[in-house]
Amino acid sequence: MSQYKAMTNETVTNYLKEIKIFPQEHKLVSKEVGDGNLNLVFRVKDLDTNKTVIVKQALPYLRVAGEGWKLTLDRNRIESEAMKIQNEICSNSVPHVYHHSDTYALTVMEDLGDMETLRKGLMSMKRFPNFPAQIGNFLAKNLFFSSDIGMSPMGKKKVVAKFISPELCDITEKLVLNDPYTNSESNNVNPHIKEDVKKLWANENVYLETAKLKNIFMTKAEALLHGDLHTGSIFINQDKSIIFDAEFAFYGPYGYDIGLLFANFILNYVSWEGRNDKNKEEIKDYRQYLLNSIEDIWNEFKKNFDDIWDKNSKDIITKVPGYKEVYIENLLHETIGFCSCEIMRRIIGMAHVPDLDEIEDLHERAKAQKLGLKIGQTILLKRNKLNSIEEFTKLIMNS
Amino acid sequence: MSQYKAMTNETVTNYLKEIKIFPQEHKLVSKEVGDGNLNLVFRVKDLDTNKTVIVKQALPYLRVAGEGWKLTLDRNRIESEAMKIQNEICSNSVPHVYHHSDTYALTVMEDLGDMETLRKGLMSMKRFPNFPAQIGNFLAKNLFFSSDIGMSPMGKKKVVAKFISPELCDITEKLVLNDPYTNSESNNVNPHIKEDVKKLWANENVYLETAKLKNIFMTKAEALLHGDLHTGSIFINQDKSIIFDAEFAFYGPYGYDIGLLFANFILNYVSWEGRNDKNKEEIKDYRQYLLNSIEDIWNEFKKNFDDIWDKNSKDIITKVPGYKEVYIENLLHETIGFCSCEIMRRIIGMAHVPDLDEIEDLHERAKAQKLGLKIGQTILLKRNKLNSIEEFTKLIMNS
């Protein structure tokens, strides 16, 4: 049996011919296009047909850290299996998987390279009026059909074991749910917000509430999460949205996925605080669009979820009067909780977002970050009193 | 490789010699002593040494239902692995495992046959003053050392997959958390409590609260549960307590284990309502002993848990100010919730308890059952307002 080795532009083209993705006699050209720290990503083009594919291969270590920080290759299997399930549950929502190899920790998939990420779109003030309906549908189907209520409790339990992912969850637990709330080595704080961050660290309620959320993250196997559903994990144009990069997939609390998505809209929302290249009216208007998007996403999600719940239940629990309402209310509270953590960690923690990082002047960036910390703490502490998505967006607007 | 076959008194003795539990030349005698529906249980004695062992073998079907209701043999592996972990975590708390075979779905273990079950002891008004300290220690260590906080989140996730048990959980979900709260075929209701049960079925709050608990049961992978910790799963004498029959073990909410135990004390408590063979003073006194035991178990659990939490933490979450208190309060609420379900299902559902079944006069039994249903509903609906074990026992006494 072959052994894992990291691919190069040369070996990857040979490999694709070997597994018959492309014919032996065609001329292929490969380019490494990855910008992450965890994986090699090759775009390979068949010059005879102009057809392209993406090859994503897991590296056995974090690239930033040299070869020091080892990381399981199994995440590539998890990602490919998650993509297959997501495509079954919600067709054409994720890139098609053409091939996966456990040995090489490598997946060959559909190339969507002509699409831009939602993050880039938001950073240039673009609007995507179809996105809420598209993602609302995706979120509703994924939650429902990967959970006890949509798969039956027996069916779900059999799948949970395939997605146990201790090392990737450990990264999230550390970088999203632990370190940002205390003075930890991994943090990366703009010197001009030091005082605000120190106040946050001194707030025991913030620490306690994030601990509760971490416990939910560690123990609640509700549905198959994407696990890292920020705006950079979504390809978009005016017609469609495609979710990618599911290597953090695992069975967790679904509010984590929805919360991350909302947080990245809010991080874009606060970024305009530090930008002088747009006029105030334009900013106000775009921010309203962002908040409307959050409302629309939730309402589309809810409408779809409601509908599937009534029609496709595999468990009698869905028939209990009042249970659906309790379930959705609790999901909203957990969503807001995880949303808050993602906002705070993208400002205090190790990994920031381009929406804020592109503000080069650290004083200007600090203005945006301070607003982010204010919103993050406010929604964290008030989340369990918020009973609708509109109360949530209002709270953001008034922060 | 050999294939599974159900053992007989003859084949089991040969098997024990083959695997060298007993010497080839010794004379063995075996007796099938099982009274369950799921397993064969042999007590095998070496007549040369008088040493005995227990052999427990899973049957591939439910015995009551003929060979119609199939049930995974994997539960025997789960039970043997759970016992090994329980013995590592809390030594001498469960029978020692001498041998396990996946092929035969069979475990050879220590014989504790000279001990009686706690249920039998309570049914004859015996008192076990050392039990709260023993079981409190067991519960605290099991919860802590099989959870994220005692194993580290990475360590725990690696173990969770070994204990995924769809079919056994399905039995619990159906018979404990679903059927008793509606007019289901599987129920078994004393005709003299029909009106009370109908009222319970008509109470939408009861149905909603049990649905919430079922959701917690299905999704919360908190710690390695015993999964069926009633008073018949505990061997006891004045010196020691030994927990057995862990085939329902899985990663679930720990309140389920503690709740089941409390419920079976309460089922004994209510049983005296229907018994005329003891005088009132004696009954009052013994009931006080039962409630004191519940308080003592919780307080011993809490004392031990508190102590381990401070000394043995593997996760930083345990250092968050106020988190321990929140954690324990939530555990109490979930404990009371599952306790309530166990009480109600042992009165309405398919499987009753000997404490009540031995009251032959159905009118007399109904008196006890009615009190049980009253207590079950009261604690279910008030659980989240109860902030101490003493408030809980007071509520029972005043029902």
Image (cartoon, coloured by chain):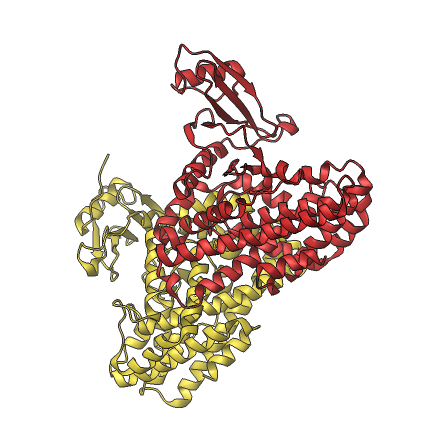
Chain colours: A yellow, B red
Residue B355: percent from left, percent from top: 69, 39
Give the residue at x 63% y 57%.
Answer: B393
Quarter of the rendering containing residue B22: top left
Task: Left or right? Give the position of B303 relative to B347.
Answer: left
The quarter of the image holding the N terminus of chain B is top left
Q: Is residue A228 above or below residue B182?
A: below
Q: Is residue B379 above or below residue A366?
A: above
Residue A88: percent from left, percent from top: 47, 50
Quarter of the rendering containing residue A186: bottom left
Give the residue at x 52% y 41%.
Answer: B166
Farthest residue to the top: give it.
B25
Farthest residue to the bottom: give it.
A280
Residue B6: percent from left, percent from top: 52, 21
Compare residues B246 and A151 and report the one nearer the observer. B246
Task: Left or right? Give the position of B307 relative to B72.
Answer: left
Residue B252: percent from left, percent from top: 50, 49
